[in-house]
Image: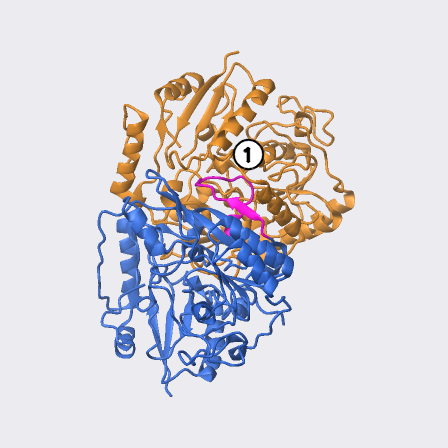
Chain colours: A orange, B blue
Amino acid sequence: MVPRLVSRWPLGLLRGCPGWRLAARAPGAPGEQSRRPRGPLKAGGAGDPACRGCSSTSRAPEVTPTRLRYPVQRLPFSEVSAEDLAAFERIVPGRVITDPLELEASNVDWLKMVRGCSQVLLRPRTTDEVSHILRHCYERNLAVTPQGGNTGMVGGSVPVFDEIILSTALMNQVLSFHSVSGILECQAGCILEELSQYVEARDFIMPLDLGAKGSCHIGGNVATNAGGLRFLRYGSLRGTVLGLEVVLADGTILNCLTSLRKDNTGYDLKQLFIGSEGTLGVITAVSILCPPRPKAVNVAFLGCPGFTEVLQTFTTCKAMVGEILSAFEFMDAKCMELVRQHLGLASPVQGDGNLHLNVTAEAFSASLLGALEPYVYAWTAEQRGSVSAEHGLGFKKRDVLGYSKPSAAVQLMRQLKLLLDPRGILNPYKTLPSQA
Amino acid sequence: MVPRLVSRWPLGLLRGCPGWRLAARAPGAPGEQSRRPRGPLKAGGAGDPACRGCSSTSRAPEVTPTRLRYPVQRLPFSEVSAEDLAAFERIVPGRVITDPLELEASNVDWLKMVRGCSQVLLRPRTTDEVSHILRHCYERNLAVTPQGGNTGMVGGSVPVFDEIILSTALMNQVLSFHSVSGILECQAGCILEELSQYVEARDFIMPLDLGAKGSCHIGGNVATNAGGLRFLRYGSLRGTVLGLEVVLADGTILNCLTSLRKDNTGYDLKQLFIGSEGTLGVITAVSILCPPRPKAVNVAFLGCPGFTEVLQTFTTCKAMVGEILSAFEFMDAKCMELVRQHLGLASPVQGDGNLHLNVTAEAFSASLLGALEPYVYAWTAEQRGSVSAEHGLGFKKRDVLGYSKPSAAVQLMRQLKLLLDPRGILNPYKTLPSQA
């Protein structure tokens, strides 16, 4: 087995401010932007008799349960009882899913690398319903995994054990749109592509765009602080998200759904929830600033003799067109050739400011991954890079947080988690490192 | 006395997303942008024998001590002893200021509305010095007011009683600048205008600009989440600030001085400190993204027959030039006339997305202010506006937070304060409402 390392350097942000996004994939694995499922996910689950509560079907025997694949121990949360199910049925009548077949897609991530064993999926429609659900779970010490479109890269949106899945799929209403300012207020479960269509019909665009737009939810985008194709031009969600409504672990509704661009009244609490991957609260509604739709979009494909010239081209473009430059990406010749050869993509030009390190090998190998990852993370830390760029930590990368953040910061993060979710019921086993 | 209400509507953000900035001024008071002091402040203090520790001079008898003008009670912090002074002298030798004359300018805000009675001003040069100072203060239960350029509007940067003033004035070193990405790392006490000159010589500009740029510090800008003249084009500091170094109340140094635009590794702790007005930690260094210097700046002054046409003009401009539109401001004819007449400004065109409500009267009247403010704040809350826009709460507006934020949010803010500063020594009497 001869692993090949391929680098694709999208220069949205260039050296000096790189965000390293690292992934090791087997050949034939889906390319991130091109093959991300655009409809509801239909990944198979099950096939593991040891995973209590999961059905045993032959559809996707390859997805090993997370608890078997990774060294992780279930925390002492309660188990869902018949009384709990009855209580949920009273809160969201007809929207308590316990059929194992229906649960499969929500137990497995789209990369098919992690798989939980949840036996209950809840589909609230309103913030009040989310509040009642969480109040019940908090009192009963039941763990909860909030789930949007389940398109994340790091296993943040599926349960690890038997956490209750709280889906935002039915929270898909636009609440308001202001045709002069371009401010959209909507529920967290709105699908990004549908929001795009909604605002484009009104001569605006969403300030973010992703390959997963056909299935990802705006609430999930905010919870993971998604970057995407328009980051260079319109900036991060920390600027474009104007307000949030969030339900805290104990069911308290925190209404910070303002539509103000300037509102320095107290601490900006919404920032706590942006990018916290559902571990500090459940986002139920979003207020977001949409830019006017550009009159035209132009793409230039340039060939440069060397990396120095790539940097010069970026500087020149940025100076000439300013903030109108939406994206800038660089791929080397070797990378283009390998992507064409291994992934069968006719035109590999897609992309946002990270080093995409793709390792191709004959088959997935845990030992190869185990040998590569510490080296790559240590090197990334040495360059003052991020081990996760815009993808977050989720389940898979929580234990490498220390490469990118000092211990005082990790300690403060733990204190914030304890403050906001003292029983730790919200998306456990995610974001924060496992306690040694 | 016939108060006249004048509205100036800068349409950076327009109706639907207004940030109401409210102030009542006597005629002849300085206009915010035009008369803000650009050198070190030389406001007189003292003149009040009841204010222990302040010298009694005749230079500025008009500035009533805050504790006499406002209903506020000193909290049970320790008082600075000779042993404390000796300890400070060991930490910052030669930079412990106790001369009442030297302290005057730091005890009074530039609006001359609030005045503290601090007897000690410390001028650290390094983060380690700040850390040692705070560790000592934390152990001794001494209250501290961090101070940058002291140019704020809400009394956030001066002591209320005898808090120790921790000045960032000597923390004025540029740490690094990256000529391709435009990322600047500098200490918190760098003066905004000097940073502007530094990056402009390298073909970049600072992403913010303020009338107070000649004296305000970048650390203070970040601590108050300053808006300013470039907000519309380059967005808020929450997007352009890439990293912060902060010293916590107990002296812990939190190094989040990354230069990454995408770094979703754990919670984004720096957001806690942006806009928290020195109440959660002392910002000691800043990493900030500077945009390329525009090739040209054009200003158009247009006359519109009515407000509908103003909105149409804004929409058209934004659609035509996109993010290159830096600012958009609207003043009605009555406003221009009154500003010219009362404030003696030849050209009143300056400005960022708020309703500037200027009330002109023969003299300052506490009873007029007391009659107007609750009405204006209640009306603002009804319109879902902010009672402070970009100016923060500081001392003067902390008790009106409830107009803009629900009680669950205020409660969470209090919990965050308690978590990060359990003894409450950092900038007490600011931001959070006084406990009833």
Q: What's the residue at 53%, 29% (across, down)?
A: A377
Q: Can you give x and y, in whole percent of width and height, for residue A370 in the image?
A: 59, 22
In this view, the residue in front, A117 or B424, is B424
Where is the C terminus of chain B found, in terms of image quarters? bottom right
- Chain ID, mark 1: A
In this view, the residue in front, A125 or A79, is A79
Q: Which residue reaches farthest top?
A: A1
Where is the N terminus of chain B found, in terms of image quarters? bottom left
Q: Can you give x and y, in whole percent of width and height, for residue A191 in the image?
A: 49, 42
Q: Badge 1: few (under 14), some or many (20 or more) residues near its Cα, within 10 Å?
A: many
Q: What's the residue at 59%, 61% (across, down)?
A: B84
**Residue B255 part of the magenta segment:** yes
On screen, residue A201 above or below B345: above
> Magenta stretch?
B251-271
Residue B425 appears in view: no
Q: Is residue B369 left or right of residue A67?
A: left
Q: Is residue A68 left or right of residue A19?
A: right
Residue B93 appears in view: yes
For label 1, the SS is helix
- Give the labeled residue for mark 1: A403
On screen, residue A52 above or below B271: above
**Residue B348 part of the magenta segment:** no
Q: Can you give x and y, in whole percent of width and height, for residue B375 in the image?
A: 48, 77
Q: Can you give x and y, in whole percent of width and height, for residue A166 in the image?
A: 63, 43
Q: What's the residue at 49%, 20% (across, down)?
A: A359
Residue type marked 1: Tyr
Q: Main secondary structure of the magenta part?
A: loop
